[in-house]
Image: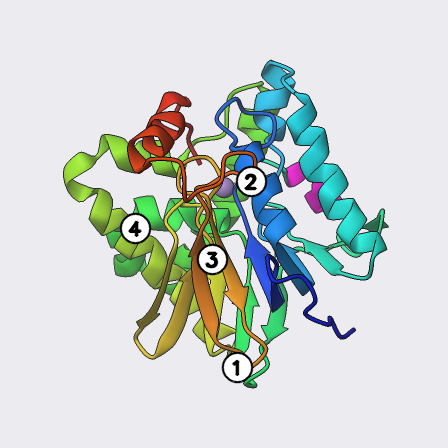
């Protein structure tokens, strides 16, 4: 599909990567995402997990009109020819039971290899399967490869048990935030583990979400990209038509033109919303 750049207010990309929207949570910045989707088009949109917060919805149903609008906007793009791939995360893991299925033009996949326009191969996954590895990084490193595989398997089992008991998903970002002093180490540890997974899959890079920490960087010769979240930072990753990756932060609304809204008021609007966890 070729998109003809027509509207000067819209940026056209090869691919957009969006994750951790947490629809179902009061903290989800749906208005910002709707506005972002209005101003950005792509041949392919990859939803990198935790788009819907099933854990939260199960406890307390919260679904305002804005959440419908996000869904409608995405489905509308799919109808108009955008390829949409949905990679479930831990909060929307109910979708993990349907890999390979399509709904409303959206493809569901557990993980994909994204081939960029410059030929680089990226492993794309949400990232929650590494929670246990990250938390017990030193023990896992000491015990070696089998412990790594075992930890990932244990993570899946524990999440299933917690879900069955009606407990909330253990949250990486809220946990990391509590460990104030070592939070940076945990982010670093997560990045390292995910980069290793990319290497195991012979990819040049990895694109993930989960820890709500958007960045484009290089770790041990592997490109590490995280699409961030729409709970606090309102970030997305955009692939240009030559394969270049860009981190976009979107903190303005179409209804209030950014150029006339003082930064302090924007910050107030952002800060007023309750903070949420991964
Ligand atoms: Mn997650």
- Kindly indicate whether the residue at mark 1 contacts the one at mark 3 (C-beta within 8 angstroms): no
Residue behind mark 1: 120
Alpha-carbon span between mark 3 and mark 4? 20 Å
Dividing the picture into quadrants, the one containing residue 116 is bottom right
Q: Nearer the viewer, mark 2 or mark 1?
A: 2
Label of residue 187 in the image: 4
Marks 2 and 1 in Cβ contact (< 8 Å)? no
Whether residue 248 sits left or right of residue 99 in the image: it is left
The residue where tag 2 is placed is 254
Report, in whole angstroms, how far the alpha carbon at label 3 lies from the one at label 1: 27 Å
On the image, the x and y values in percent for residue 121 come to 55, 78
Element class at badge 1:
loop
Near mark 4 (Cα within 10 A), the count class, few <14, some 14-19 or many ≥20, is some
The structure residue drawn at horizontal position 39% and vertical position 53%, both measured from the top left corner, is: 214
- The Cα–Cα distance between marks 2 and 1, rounded to whole angstroms, is 34 Å
Q: Residue extending furthest left?
A: 181
How far from the left and from the top, in percent, is residue 255?
56, 34
Q: Label 2 neighbourhood size at 10 Å, few (<14), some (14-19), many (20+)?
A: few
Q: Is residue 131 above or below residue 190?
A: above
Task: Identify which residue is drawn at 69% across, 45% down.
Answer: 96
**Disc 2 element:** loop
Magenta stretch, residue numbers: 93-97
């Amino acid at each position: 599909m070729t998109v003809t750049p027509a509207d000067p207010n819209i940026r056209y990309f090869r691919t957009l990567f969006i994750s951790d929207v947490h629809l179902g949570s009061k903290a989800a910045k749906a208005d910002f995402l709707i506005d972002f989707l209005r101003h950005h088009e792509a041949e392919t949109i990859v939803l990198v997990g935790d788009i819907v917060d099933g854990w939260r919805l199960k406890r307390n149903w919260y679904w305002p009109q804005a959440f419908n609008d996000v869904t409608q906007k995405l489905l509308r793009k799919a109808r108009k020819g955008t390829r949409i791939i949905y990679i479930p995360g831990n909060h929307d893991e109910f979708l993990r039971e349907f890999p390979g299925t399509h709904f409303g033009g959206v493809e569901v996949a557990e993980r994909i290899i994204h081939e960029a326009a410059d030929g680089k191969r990226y492993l794309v996954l949400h990232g929650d399967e590494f929670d246990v590895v990250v938390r017990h990084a030193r023990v896992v490193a000491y015990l070696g490869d089998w412990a790594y595989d075992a930890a990932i398997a244990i993570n899946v089992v524990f999440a299933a048990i917690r879900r069955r008991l009606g407990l909330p998903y253990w949250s990486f970002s809220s946990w990391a935030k509590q460990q104030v002093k070592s939070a940076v180490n945990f982010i670093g540890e997560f990045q390292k583990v995910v980069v290793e997974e990319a290497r195991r899959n012979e990819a040049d890079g990895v694109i993930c979400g989960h820890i709500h920490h958007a960045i484009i960087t290089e770790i041990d010769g592997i490109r590490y990209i995280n699409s961030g979240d729409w709970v606090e930072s309102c970030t997305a990753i955009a692939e240009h038509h030559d394969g270049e990756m860009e981190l976009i932060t979107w903190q303005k609304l179409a209804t209030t033109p950014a150029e006339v809204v003082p930064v302090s008021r924007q910050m107030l609007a952002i800060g007023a919303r309750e903070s949420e966890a991964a």
